[in-house]
Image: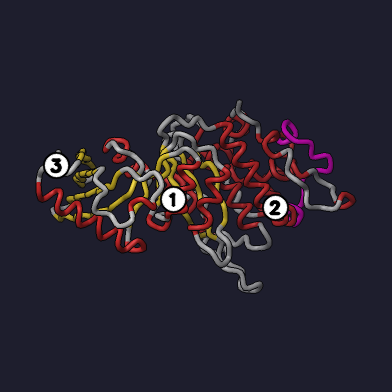
Amino acid sequence: MALSLQEAFSSLEDPRIERHKRHQLLDIIILTICAVISGAEGWEAIEAFGKEKQHWLHKWIGLENGIPSHDCIARVISRLDPGKLTECFIAWAQSVAELALGEVVAIDGKTARHSYDRKNKLGAIHMVSAWASQAGISLGQVKTEAKSNEITAIPALLDLLEVKGCIITIDAMGCQTEITEKIIEKQADYVLAVKGNQKHLHEAIIDYFEEAIAANKPGLCQLQTVEETDVGHGRIETRRCYLSTCLDTLPDAEKWKGLKAIGRVESERVINGQTTLERRHYICSLADVKPFAHAARAHWGIENSLHWVLDVTFREDDSRIRKGYAPENFNIVRQLAVNLLKKDSSKLSIKRKRFMAALSDKFREKVIFST
């Protein structure tokens, strides 16, 4: 059963001292979400939205002492425990997402470029997110530790998610034995890109496919293939996917938990008479080329449907929100806004939906409170 936003965030602990509270925490959170969906990109804009839409907001939240000031909103959001806020977000996302068996869950990282704080010697935050491709929803995100990277963040994110029966896709950074163990532990499958960070494995996979394809004996090489072509916008793209369950040539194949096959994807593009060819290589726990090909292609949905939207529509990279936990927490609010806007069935772009949410109380209400 889908949780309402009020239900999802009601358990969040308020960081303020009781005697200093003039505004309820849930009021501030719901106000912030509504404002961001309607185009607000900073604290002053959230306050301005609240004052303009106070009558409408009263339908959903108390606001006993009116609209909080932008300074109050900033202080509260910057002090919220991002781990607890993430747990509330994930609980809500998993209650509204309908993950089918074989759902591709793409995991990838993104840096908010202007979230650095030179005064306090803090670098830009880097968030690792999980995107359910078919459901079209962000399932959750975690921040990488200051002296760490995605390798430690990915297992932490997987621990928070319910991904049984899904296919987890990760770029080459996530091609680690510990991560394959975590995915299998979560009763999911994986398709992991392999590049130079796993030098010997990468070279062995390349050598295998060069010889197997040249031999032209699919049965002998346990080689499965599938090909598809897209034509449009002056471009012809042909994708050839190869999968082999022959692991004999791999170094230390047994250390990769659940490993069943290796894969190659060739993307041949013809644009204005110029041909380019790109090859990518993978390890996976799938033994069938069709779900492998689908997963390898679906992985890029996290770039197109989440990261691009955050950059272009929500202008995340231009944000100057920097103090305390505010950059991380505001990122969670943005991803929640993306989810709500994408779940709306209107045949409009995300940018147009935000514009409509700013103009129309009825449209905004449908987007935010009809889940």
Q: Is residue 87 visible?
A: yes
Q: Which disc, if any, is residue 251?
A: none
N-terminal label among 1 and 2: 2
What amino acid is labelled 3 in the image? Leu
Query: Can you identify the residue that label 2 sits on?
Result: 81
Magenta residues?
57-73
Label 3 element class: loop
The percent position of residue 328, horizontal first and vertical second, equals 61, 55
Residue toward you, 216 or 97: 216
Q: Residues within 10 Å of mark 3 (few under 14, many from 20)?
A: few
Prevailing SS of the magenta stretch: loop
* Residue depicted at x 76% and y 54%: 72
What amino acid is labelled 1 in the image? Trp
Name the side, left or right, on which 153 lies relative to 117: left
Mark 1 or 2: the one toward you = 2
The percent position of residue 227, horizontal first and vertical second, equals 19, 39
Q: Residues within 10 Å of mark 2 (few under 14, many from 20)?
A: some
Name the side, left or right, on which 255 lies relative to 27: left
* Residue depicted at x 17% and y 50%: 270
Q: Which disc, if any, is residue 220?
A: 3
Whether residue 26 is in magenta: the answer is no
